[in-house]
Structures are given as structure tokens and as C-alpha cells.
Amino acid sequence: MDNAGIAAKIDILKKEKNAVILAHNYCRPEVQDIADYSGDSLALSRIAANTDADVIVFCGVHFMAETAHILSPQKTVLLPDSQSGCPMADMLTAAQLKEFKNNYPGATVVAYVNTTAAVKAEADICCTSGNAVNLIHHLAQVDNIIFVPDKHLGSYLSRKSGKSFKIWEGYCPVHQKIGPEDIIREKKAHPSAKVLAHPECSQEVLKLADDVLSTEGICRYAVTSDVDEIIYATEIGIQHRLEKENPDKRFYPASKSAVCHDMKKITLEKVARSLEKMSPVIRVPDDVCYQARRAVDKMLEII
């Protein structure tokens, strides 16, 4: 069956199951095209919290599906490939965070949403790349902050806020592949282009960018600005949405090697099979779900 046939099958199954399909901006183009909603983790977190569907099909990685279940525990959350994980999320366990917290009594723990449910349960509040700056601003009176797990986002927020954070040494391997030499090369090739960088990039890359934005922020900038050329320092899956929404503009990846192979594990065939068999189902234990929900809800109250 070709993609059109599989997409038609998915549409039928979606209606039968009263399902909503959410796809991250890094997913394959054909997966983004069959989704009811595409976006970054912030946008999809909001949708997961408010959807009336009985079934959430999360085309993304494991922690995203966990977050959807945390926000909607009464719904069935499907992850079309249960092996679609996040290396950065795997760089910090709940036990490691507990030990880290013991070194800094009384500190407020801010956990990037790119963490497991068990880590979120040990945090005071969550953030995404899209709301992190505003959230830290909201915590202006808090002097003692632990930020986990992304050292690059943590360092960026520390610089923006003027606060000294205790930062876990995690990172995104995909964004780590993008170096300052990539920005310099692409800027030389496209001197009129604006450089937009995701805050998971290294500080050396962020300093060369014209703006630092989440994937949703990059997409919004492309639509609302009068800039015709953009160099983007993030995962290349975003190219599809950028070109789809801005057919008259040109977009250049800072590095073509910035590919998240976990996101690419989600295929149309797997989405169809997931809806057909109603598996793999992602669940979070009740006690972990309750504690993690507190940290996620605090984030959603602010944004």
C-alpha cells in the first residue's frame, strides 16, 4: 500500500477510535502531513491537555507520550514505536536527580520537559524550550535553581537571567552535532539569511545566531517576519513545515547531519498498526503520574 492508501486507512481508524494524532516537528514529512496537530513539545503538551479525543496517538518520542498520559490519564496514549526514545532524557534518572538535589538543599528544581516521568516527579516545575525564558523570569525571586538535564539550555537561561544555576551535564546529541563552523559556513554561503538557533545548541552556536528560538518559535518567525532566507540550527525535520507554510522563502539547515533517528522511527505504517492494534500503550504509574503532574501543571499555569 502506498502512502496515500495508508493515510486513508489511518483516517478511517482515527474516526473509529475517536483518536487525535499529534506529530512533532522533527517527524517524517508524511507523518506530519497526516497529523491533526504538528508542533513542538509546548504546543503538543497544550493540545494533549485539552483534547476531547479518547485516544492520543503521539508521533514523537517516549517522554512526550508519557507527558500526554500525565496530562490525560483517563485517555489511551499510543506511541507508534515504543523504541522511539530521547538520548538526552536517558542521561538523567530519578535516582541521580535525588542525589543531585541532596547537594543543594532547598533549591528549586526546574526540569526540561525532555525528561522521563520519574524525573519530572522529582522536579518542582517543568519547562519547554518555548517557555523556558518566561518561566525563569517568573521565578525571579528564586535564587537557588537546579536545572536538568540540558547543560546548553541551562547555560543559556543562566546567561539570560543573570542567575547562577546548578546544571546537570546532559545534552541533545542531535543539536550537539551543530558547530559554530556550520553557522559560519552557511552564513558565508547565504549572507542575507538570518540565523535562528534552538537553545539546545552549544553556547558557541547560540552566540552566532540572530535569535534563539524553539522549533515553534522558528516556524512562527518564518511566517510573521519579512525575512526571505533563514538558516536554522535544529533538527532537519523542521524543513518540511517551514517550506509548506512559506513556499516563497528559502531555508537552509545549519547541518544536514542534525537528524533525530528516534523521531524518524515513526512511520505511516506504524501509525496505522498502532491504531489498528491499539498498542503500544504508554502508561505512567499512578504515584509517579500524580507527582509529575504537579510539575507540569505549574508550567502550564504560567504559559
Image (tube, grey):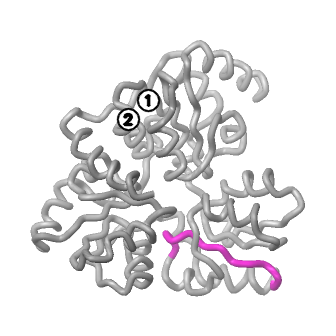
Helix, strand or loop at mark 2? helix
Location of residue 137 with respect to 159 vertically, above or below: above
Give the farthest residue toward the right.
248
In x, y percent, where is residue 303? 45, 57
In x, y percent, where is residue 252? 76, 69
Q: Is residue 16 visible in the rendered structure shown here?
A: yes
Number of numbered callouts drawn: 2
- In the image, 268: left or right of 40? right
Which picture quadrant has residue 98? bottom left
For the point 61% across and 23% down, which residue is it? 272
Magenta region includes residue 81: no
In x, y percent, where is residue 79? 47, 33
Location of residue 236 with respect to 199 vertically, above or below: above
Which circle's residue, 1 or 2, is located before the other in the chain?
2
Measured Cα–Cα span from mark 1 to mark 2: 6 Å
Label 1 belongs to which residue?
A: 77
Location of residue 156 with respect to 42 vertically, above or below: below
- Determine contact: label 1, label 2, CB under 8 Å: yes
Residue nearer the viewer, 263 or 112: 112
Label 2 belongs to which residue?
A: 69
For the point 30% across and 69% down, which residue is it? 147
For the point 65% across and 31% down, which residue is it? 268
Where is the N terminus found, in terms of image quarters?
Answer: top right
Magenta region includes residue 199: yes
Which picture quadrant has residue 264? top right
Q: Main secondary structure of the magenta part?
A: loop
Give neighbour class at mark 2: few <14, some 14-19, many 20+ (Cα, 10 Å).
many
Residue nearer the viewer, 153 or 125: 125
Three-letter amino acid code at the position of disc 1: Val
| Magenta residues (range) | 191-201
Which picture quadrant has residue 233? bottom right
Q: Is residue 80 visible in the rendered structure shown here?
A: no
